[in-house]
C-alpha cells in the first residue's frame, strides 16, 4: 500500500525507539497492531456489505427480467384486424369528409357577400365612377361630381 521497504522500516523502528524509549515501545507496537487489525475488520465488513447489496440488486434485476419474459410468453398474440371492418371505417370517414365539404360549399354559396369586411382600397374602387378620379385623403374619400 505505502510501498515501504526494509530500510524504511529500520529507520522508523530506530526513530520510535529513540522517541518512545525501550520501556514504552512494546506497548506502542501492540497498540498499532490492534488499530490496524480493527481497520482491516471494518474494511472487510464494508466490502462484504457492498458485495451483498450488489448481488441482491442483480438478483432482483434477474427476477424482473424473468417475469417480463413470462408475461410476454403468456400474453396472447396481437389480433389481426378484419380487412372488411377497416375498409368500412375508411369509407365512413371519407363519406363524412365529403359531406362536410359539401355543406361548407353550400354555406359559402348562400352566404351574403356584403357582410364580408372590405378594405379601404376596395371600398374606394366600388364608390368611384369610372370617369372620375378618387380624392386623395385616405379610404374615406368620396367622389365629387365635376
Image (spheres, rainbow, N blue to C red):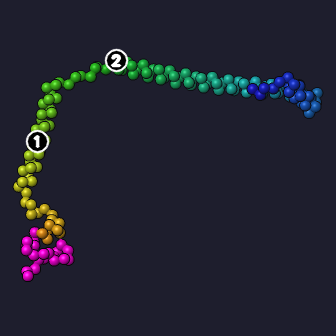
Among the two numbered marks 1 and 2 on one chain, the one whose residue lies closer to the N terminus:
2
Residue at the spot x=12%, y=34% of the render? 91
Tag 1: Cα neighbours inside 10 Å, few (<14), some, or many (≥20)? few
**Can residue 98 be seen?**
yes
**Which quadrant of the figure has residue 49?**
top right
Q: Which mark is residue 6?
A: none
Residue stretch rendered in magenta on the structure: 126-146
Horizontal and vertical percent position of residue 48: 63, 22
Relative to residue 125, is residue 20 depicted above or below?
Answer: above
Q: Is the magenta stretch mostly helix, strand or loop?
A: loop
**Which quadrant of the figure has residue 129?**
bottom left
In the picture, the quarter occupied by the N terminus is: top right
**Which quadrant of the figure has residue 43?**
top right
Label 1 – label 2 distance at C-alpha: 45 Å
Horizontal and vertical percent position of residue 73: 34, 17
Extreme residue toward the left, this view: 110
- SS at circle 1: helix
**Can residue 24 be seen?**
no
Horizontal and vertical percent position of residue 17: 92, 29
Residue at numbered disc 2:
73
Residue at numbered disc 1:
98
Amino acid at each position: 500500500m505505502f510501498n515501504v521497504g526494509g530500510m524504511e522500516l529500520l529507520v522508523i523502528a530506530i526513530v520510535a525507539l529513540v522517541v518512545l524509549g525501550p520501556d514504552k515501545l512494546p506497548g506502542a507496537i501492540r497498540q498499532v497492531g490492534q488499530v490496524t487489525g480493527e481497520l482491516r475488520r471494518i474494511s472487510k465488513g464494508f466490502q462484504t456489505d457492498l458485495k451483498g447489496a450488489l448481488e441482491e440488486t442483480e438478483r432482483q434485476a434477474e427476477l424482473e427480467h424473468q417475469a417480463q419474459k413470462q408475461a410476454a410468453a403468456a400474453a396472447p398474440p396481437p389480433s389481426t384486424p378484419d380487412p372488411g371492418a377497416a375498409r368500412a371505417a375508411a369509407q365512413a370517414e371519407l363519406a363524412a369528409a365529403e359531406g362536410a365539404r359539401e355543406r361548407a360549399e353550400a354555406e359559402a354559396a348562400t352566404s351574403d357577400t356584403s357582410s364580408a369586411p372590405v378594405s379601404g382600397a376596395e371600398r374606394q374602387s366600388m364608390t368611384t365612377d369610372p370617369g372620375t378620379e378618387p380624392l386623395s385623403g385616405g379610404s374615406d374619400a368620396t367622389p365629387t361630381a365635376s
